[in-house]
Image: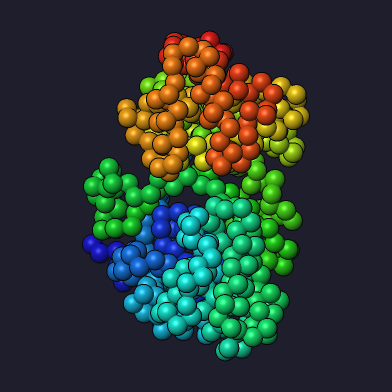
Amino acid sequence: MRLSRENCKVNRYDEKILQFGEGNFLRAFVDWIIYKMNGEANFNSGVTVIQPIREGLSHLLNEQDGLYTLYLNGLKNGKPVREKMLIDCINTAINPYDRYDQYLETALNPNIRFIISNTTEAGITYNKQDNEKDCPPKSFPGKLTAWLYKRYEAGKKGVIIMPCELIDRNGDKLKKIVLNLAQDWGKKEAFMRWIKEENFFCNSLVDRIVPGFPKEQIKEILQELGYDDKLVVEGEQFHLWVIEAPDWVKEEFPADLAGLNVLFVDDISPYRTRKVRILNGAHTTMVPIGLLYGLNTVKEAVENETVGQLIQSALYDEIIPTLDLPESELKAFAKDVLDRFRNPYIKHYLKSIALNSTSKFETRVLPSILEYKKRLGCLPLKLVFALAGLFALYRERNNITMADNEEIIQMYDKAWKACGSSKEDYFKMVEKLLGQEQVWKTNLNRVEGLTEQVADYLYLIETEGMNKAVQTIL
C-alpha cells in the first residue's frame, strides 16, 4: 500500500512553520517535537519543508503527502524500548531550484510564525557571491534573506527563527550574515531595521542521536508496517533542545505543555559547553583508544571492562570538574550519556566518529585538558592518554580508515616517518606535533608537563600495545 493521506487517517494542520532541511535529523527531532506539540499542547502547526540544496528528498516527501514513520529506540528507565509513530505535521515540500516562485510565495502567508533550519554546519556561512537575482541564491542565508525581503515588502509580520545547525551561537551568526547580504544587495536601512526589530533569531542547541534510514532491517519493517515508506527514520529515545530566548517565545512554542525536554534559557553557553565536553568529548576520547583496542562500536567501548572504566573515569573525574553547572546536574547528564552509548538498538561505529579526529579533539577534549590544568594544577591523565592515542591512531590509519584534512594527514605522515624508536625520538616528535599552533590554536608545549606525559604514553602504546597500555594507566 502507498503511504498517503488518502490511505491513512491523519490530521492536517495550518501552515505555521517553514523548515529549511528535510534530512533525517530534522524529521526525527524537530518534526517529532511539532507532532507531539500538536497532539498534546494544541499547537496546531503544519510544516512546509524547503529543500536547501539542489539534490534532496522533497520529491519523496511529496509522494508520501509529507508522511513518514519514525522509530524511537533506546533505554527508558533502564529497559529497552522501541516505539513507532506516523509523523503527520509536514504539509508539503518545495524544491526552490525547481519552484522558486512557489518558495517566495510562502513569504506572503501571514500565518507563518517560525523558521527552523538544519543545513549542516557548513550551511550558515557568508557567501559574497550570493546574488539576489539568482533563483534561488546559493546559500541558505541567501535564500532566507530573499524570503525575508519578500515578506517585508508585503508588509507582513516578522518571524521567530530557530536554527539547529551545530555551531556556536547559530542564531547570532545567521542574523549577522542576513544583514550583511541585505547590505550587499543594496537594501534600505528600513529593511535592516525590520530584520532587527520585527524578527527574533534564537541561539539553540539540539541533541538526539539519529542513525537515520534502517536499511539493514527495512524489509522486516515494511512488512510490519503494511505500507511502503521510503522515508522511515530511526532515532534514540533521548532528546534535548535548549533555546536562548525570552519568555514570550516560550509562550508561542509551548513544548513544556507536551512534556518535552525543551529548555528556554537566558544563556545557552553552559549547556553547549556541557554537551560538547561530556557527550562529544567522550565520543572523541574513546575513538582512538577503542579502535586501537580492537573495538568497533560505542556500545562495545563503554561496556568493555577496561576501556569502559577509563571512559567513565575521564567523564566523572576529569571532564565534569572543568564545568560550571551544578555537579548533580552534570552527573545526571553524564549518566544519561552513558545510557545512550549503551543503546542496544544503535550501532554507532567508532570509525564513523573518527572523521576529522584532530579538529574534533581540539574543540571537544583539549578545552577540558587546559581547564583541568588551570583549576587543579595538574594534568588529567586519562584525557592526555587519549591525546597520545590520537597520535598513534594516525600512524595506523592504513589499517583503520581515517578521513581528514589532507594537511593534517601529511603532518602526521611526516612526523611518523621522521620518528625513530627511542623514547627521546618520541619526545621530539610529540614536541613538534604539539607545537603546531595552526592545529591547536596555541603551542601546547607551553602546558607544563604535557609534552613529556604525551610522549611517555605514546611510547607505552607503541611498545606495549593499546590493550596493555590501558590496563597500565588504570
Q: Out of 226 and 158, give the one closest to the viewer.
A: 158
Question: How many numbered dots are placed on residues in this image?
Answer: 0
Quadrant containing the C terminus in the rendered view: top right
- Using the image as rendered, state which of residue 27 and residue 44 is in the foreground: 27
Vertical arrangement, residue 421 with respect to residue 186, above or below: above
In the rendered image, residue 84, in percent from the top left (x then y), is placed at: 40, 50
Across and down, in percent, residue 77 comes to 55, 35
In the picture, the quarter occupied by the N terminus is: bottom left
Q: Where is residue 209 in the image (x, y as percent from the top left)?
A: 47, 45
Quarter of the image for residue 257 reads: bottom right
- Depicted 421 relative to depicted 98: above or below: above
Q: Which of 208 and 371 is in front in this view?
A: 371
Colour setting? rainbow
| Residue 84, visible in the rendered structure | yes
Residue 34 is left or right of residue 274, and the answer is: left
| Residue 340 makes an appearance in the image | no
Seen at 73% across and 40% down, the residue is: 325
Furthest residue in direction bottom, as rendered? 154
Residue at 71% across / 27% down in the picture? 373
Residue beneath the point at 56% across and 74% down: 181
Residue drawn at x 64%, y 56% as measured from the top left: 169
Q: Quadrant of residue 408?
A: top left
Q: Is 158 situated above or below 122?
A: below
State left or right for residue 239 relative to residue 27: right
Q: Position of residue 86 (x, y in %)?
A: 40, 58
